[in-house]
Image (cartoon, rainbow, N blue to C red):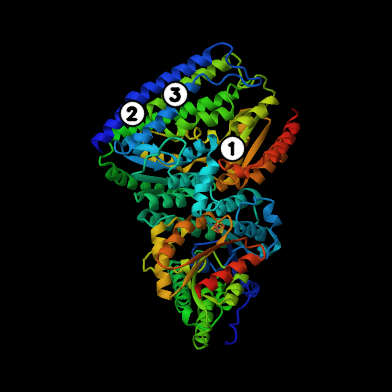
Amino acid sequence: MSIPGQLAYQLNVNVLGKAALRVQRWQLERKLSKPGTWKHETLNAPIDTAPWLKELITKHYLTGRYANGARKVAWVTSGAPVEFLKALDYFLIYPENHGAVCGIRKVGEEMCTHAEDFGYSRDICSYARCDIGSVLSGKTPVGRLPKPDLLLCCNNICQTVLYWYQVLAHHFGCPLIVIDTPFIYDEAREHDIASVKRQIEDAFPIAERVAERTIEPKRLEDVMLRSRDAVDLWLKVLQTGRNHPSPITAFDEFIHMAPIVEMRGESATVDYYSAMLSALEQRAKDGVGALKHEKKRILWDNLPIWYRIRPLGEKLAEHGVAMVASTYTNAWGELAELINADHPMDSMAKCYLHPILNRGTGHKLQTMQKMLTEYEADGVILHSDRSCKPYSIGQIDQRNAVSDKLGKPALLLEADHTDGRAYSVEQADTRISAFLELLGV
Amino acid sequence: MPASVDLPSRTTVIERFKGQGGRIAAVLPIHYPRALFRAFGMLPIEVWGPPGVDKSTGDAHLQAYACSTVRAGLSFILSGAGEVADAILVPHTCDSLQALASVLLDFTKPHQMVLTLYVPKAERASDLEFLGKELRRVFGRLVELTGQRPTDAELHAAMDREQQADEVLARLLSERGKLGVGNREFYGVVRSREYLPAEEFASLARAALDKWAGAPLPKRTPILATGIMPEPMDVLDALDEAGLSIVADDFAGSGRRLYKASTAHDPFDRMAKTLLSGSPDPTRGCGIQPRIDHLVDLAKRTGARGALFYEIKFCEPEAFYVPLVTRGLQAAGVPCLAVEVDITDPMPDQLVTRIEAFAESLS
Ligand code: SF4
Ligand code: SF4
């Protein structure tokens, strides 16, 4: 670590940045709390904690901007076991989340094009194209991404990340740790769990060598506890969607999931979700829904269409349709019970083997059916995401099962989570309108 | 040109094997233990597509952005043609095959036993240990299916036979540049490894080697070819016509399955070591530089003057490697052409034109 790097980091992140962001948050909070400021016809005001979320995310990327030279940086996949890296004080970048930011800021296409110009096929995941495009062009909507000292790739979400991280390892020339999680078609076997556990154990010395320090068991335990608390709170946040009317929609969840994905194991994340939960519980108690008039409730399957979140949310809200839950945001909460800080290695191995994306298509259907019941939802939109084969292939049968066996309307909506070129507004509108008719709104 | 090698068709081989009381396993790409099946009296027949199949059955379950190998594969399994199989094995190769196995197990539920095999994505000690156990699990499933329990000696004997077949295949591929035979006929023999019993393949390939070694060498430009497989095989005719000869093979189905012999005492350890010993393979998430180094070395050893990247549309594992690996080869003086196909579509004219232009640029 360099002294000028440390100084720049402390000054820009912990002194100036912190103060400026706090002021911004305070201003936004004041603006939102002024009576009469919110005038939307169909949607109620955003959740009170929204300005705080903005502060958290901006601080995260600001920290990233000055991290090189001050802290070790690791780029990690969204489902990776990051607790040991946190315990070593790595600053973590989640390229998938960066892809989501590109999607939200509507620069996904531009980033993808940089990668395509280099020869990457338009058929590979748009998160990967966004990230590689950003690396190659040096462009990003978040200012600057720090270079990694270490890469951690866990394929419990897809195999795509294996190839993608090999590209990154080649580009940055830094060590790459692969945690290879056997796919669970029905149930995890002992050798599956043992293998993941051993790989995590084998990863420790590599991460320690790069960090030039050793993992303190107490620190690891603390990080795990904070991870578990955050996951637990996140699940409770999602479950407020079971209220009628629902105080939250899946569209809100997509935005508010950033901390649980990229700031797991931090106390700020626990504090944030704790406050968010209180705000939502209050809304539920007061009978305040996310929509002004909730008539029907639906479930979302797969990643969001980041660049269409607002228009889609508004279109549904116009018809009184609340998207009360999603299998995607649920994925970051459903494994809470598997985290056990008393048995960190075993529980990490089990936990990281079981994300929905590492389990069979039948399990996903069961999750959908369970959520339809628990959230008393009337139908499902399954985003058939051209980029994400592990999430999407199987949806035709899942859709058929939901509509034929449960008799609930189910729409397969063709799109891509970040690349707008795979989304036809007219076609999607027509299909959504037909779906709304089936819902009877 | 010598008389062509007399290859039995898949149907003939299947009927003959079944007629002798054997069982058939339909196996999807790529890496799996042939010997394990043979020790149970089962013949693995590989399903790489196949290209001629009507995709509509598969399309009722899979979106259009699943690759054509997977869509054709599912259609094939669900069609009458798949009925000959007593079991289906889907190795874990990529997200699309992973999903295919899952759809089979959870939704279409064919009457045959559906087996999965998780092939680790690295070659560390933990991967070897895992794979050994995973192979034992598949062994257990085959015991359930057949009621047989091959001994360690029987497993080793089956592995010895496969090893011999692999050695002949390696000879075929390494001596390719000296063989007087066209691409189409050559790959007919190479790809018969996908369905012939190992011992039959070994003797047929030896005979082919003898025959072709003495034949006059056609004047062709030597190239390296990589991708999943040369399918539809019309591409081989196009290469023949363009005057290109594949002398360096990095196809997932052939060149990347030249496994190294292992002497491990435990049959499952031996199988695991063998399976993880192939050349750098994108479907197993290999490093970029090791793959570049391997291909550059292969091109240099065989005298290949250019490299053809013959890719299947929507095949992510391959697609990720193309930009950097082609640059690596080009930097080493090996010009590259990357093309993309849907194996179930007829060969597009545009592709033939590109191959011809590539051939001209090399000559
Ligand atoms: S393929 Fe799917 S799971 Fe994998 S990185 Fe892309 S969006 Fe995420
Ligand atoms: S062609 Fe590629 S994507 Fe398709 S099954 Fe083979 S490896 Fe998987």
Q: Indicate which disc residue A272 carries.
A: 3
Q: Indicate which disc residue A12 carries.
A: 2
In this rendering, which labeled residue sits more in front, label 1 or label 3?
1
Task: Confirm if mark 3 falls within 8 A of ligand 1.
Answer: no
In this rendering, which labeled residue sits more in front, label 2 or label 1?
2
Q: Earlier in the sequence, mark 2 or mark 3?
A: 2
Amino acid type of the residue that numbered disc 3 sits on in the rendered structure: Tyr
Numbered circles on residues, count:
3
- Please say whether residue A183 is visible from this viewpoint: no
Query: Percent from the top left, x then y, of residue A399?
Result: 67, 41
Chain that bears disc 2: A
Amino acid type of the residue that numbered disc 1 sits on in the rendered structure: Ile
| Mark 2 element type | helix
Amino acid type of the residue that numbered disc 2 sits on in the rendered structure: Asn
Check if mark 2 and mark 1 are on a common chain.
yes
In this rendering, which labeled residue sits more in front, label 2 or label 3?
2
| Mark 1 element type | loop
Which residue corresponds to the image point at 44% horizontal and 17% vertical from the top-left?
A: A26
Q: Few, some or many C-alpha atoms within 10 Å of disc 3 (few <14, some 14-19, many ≥20)?
A: many
Q: Is residue A194 left or right of residue A8?
A: right
Q: Which corner quadrant of the image does residue A362 belong to? A: top right
Q: Distance of mark 2 from mark 1, alpha carbons?
A: 34 Å
- Residue at the disc numbered 1: A305
In the depicted structure, whether residue B115 falls above or below residue A320? below
Q: Few, some or many C-alpha atoms within 10 Å of disc 2 (few <14, some 14-19, many ≥20)?
A: some
**Which quadrant would the N terminus of chain B be assigned to in this image?**
bottom right
